[in-house]
Structure formats: C-alpha cells, structure tokens
Image (spheres, rainbow, N blue to C red):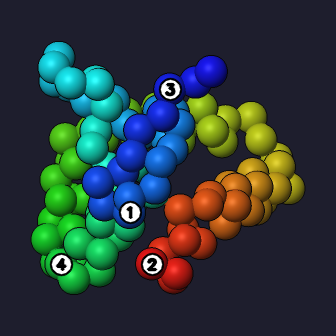
C-alpha cells in the first residue's frame, strides 16, 4: 500500500506522489502542501504581483538563455511547418488537461 499524507492547506489526504519532495532531511521528506495547492498559491501570487512575476521571469530567462535555446532547438529542429503546428497544438491540449488548473476555479 502506498503511503499517504494530509495537505495542510486543503486538508485532503493524498498519496505521497501528489506532494513535492522537501530538501529537509527531517520529517516525511515531502512538503506540507500538495502540488495542487502549491500551484494555486503560485498562480494567485503571480496574479496579484504581475510586475514582480515578470521581473522574475526575465531574470530567470537572462540567467538561463543557453538552456532555453537548447530546449527550443531540440523541440523544433528538423520539423516541417505542419509538424511544428501539431506540436504546439499538442502542448496546448496537454496544459488544458492538467487537473490543478481546472481546480483553481473551485477553490
């Protein structure tokens, strides 16, 4: 049987796989809040602090330009225009399927 843990934010008991790992060595080794609650918290913060979020994004991009370039090259190298379009549609569809994005409206 898989281990479970209760989220301190939503109060739901969930599988450990629904919690992010913690860097701390004491305790369960997992964060106190589930991934869905963490995503909602981040989403709410980004909505209420758009300028800070934009600055953070820019800073991360400027510090990781090489990573972004490599990722984009891997994603789009040797693809026809139709294949590139299909890849973009697939990515957008996958984002819509993520449960936590749909849960934001109900919490």
Q: Which residue is mark 2?
A: 107
Give coordinates of residue 17: x percent, y percent: 51, 33
* Circles 2 and 1 in contact, beta carbons < 8 Å: yes
Q: Secondary structure at mark 2?
A: loop
- Compared to 1, does 70 lie above or below? below
Give coordinates of residue 69: x percent, y percent: 43, 38
Foreground mark, 3 or 2? 3
Foreground mark, 4 or 2? 2
Q: Which residue is mark 4?
A: 49
Q: Mark 2 to mark 1: distance in Å? A: 9 Å
Q: Residues within 10 Å of mark 1 (few under 14, many from 20)?
A: few
Instruction: Check residue 18 in the rendering and tell me which mark sits there, or answer none.
Output: none
The quarter holding residue 58 reads bottom left
Instruction: Check residue 10 in the rendering and tell me which mark sits there, or answer none.
Output: 1
Q: Residues within 10 Å of mark 2 (few under 14, many from 20)?
A: few
Note whether residue 73 is visible.
yes
Q: Is residue 76 left or right of residue 87?
A: left
Q: Nearer the viewer, residue 47 or 32?
A: 32
Q: Which residue is mark 3?
A: 3
Q: Residues within 10 Å of mark 4 (few under 14, many from 20)?
A: few
Q: Secondary structure at mark 3?
A: loop
Residue at screen point 30% across, 66% down: 41
Q: Residues within 10 Å of mark 3 (few under 14, many from 20)?
A: few
Q: Secondary structure at mark 4?
A: loop
Residue at screen point 76% across, 55% down: 90
Note whether residue 54 is visible.
no
Q: Nearer the viewer, residue 62 or 94?
A: 94
Q: Is residue 87 left or right of residue 46?
A: right
The quarter holding residue 56 reads bottom left
Looking at marks 3 and 2 on the same chain, the residue that comes earlier in the sequence is marked by: 3
């Amino acid at each position: 049987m898989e281990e479970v843990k209760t989220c301190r934010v939503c109060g739901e008991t969930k599988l450990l796989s629904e919690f992010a790992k913690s860097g701390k060595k004491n305790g369960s080794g997992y964060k106190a809040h589930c991934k869905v609650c963490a995503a909602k918290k981040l989403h709410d913060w980004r909505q209420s602090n758009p300028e800070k979020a934009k600055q953070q994004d820019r800073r991360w991009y400027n510090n990781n330009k090489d990573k972004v370039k490599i990722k984009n090259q891997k994603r789009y190298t040797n693809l026809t225009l139709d294949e590139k379009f299909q890849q973009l549609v697939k990515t957008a569809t996958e984002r819509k399927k993520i449960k936590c994005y749909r849960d934001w409206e109900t919490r």
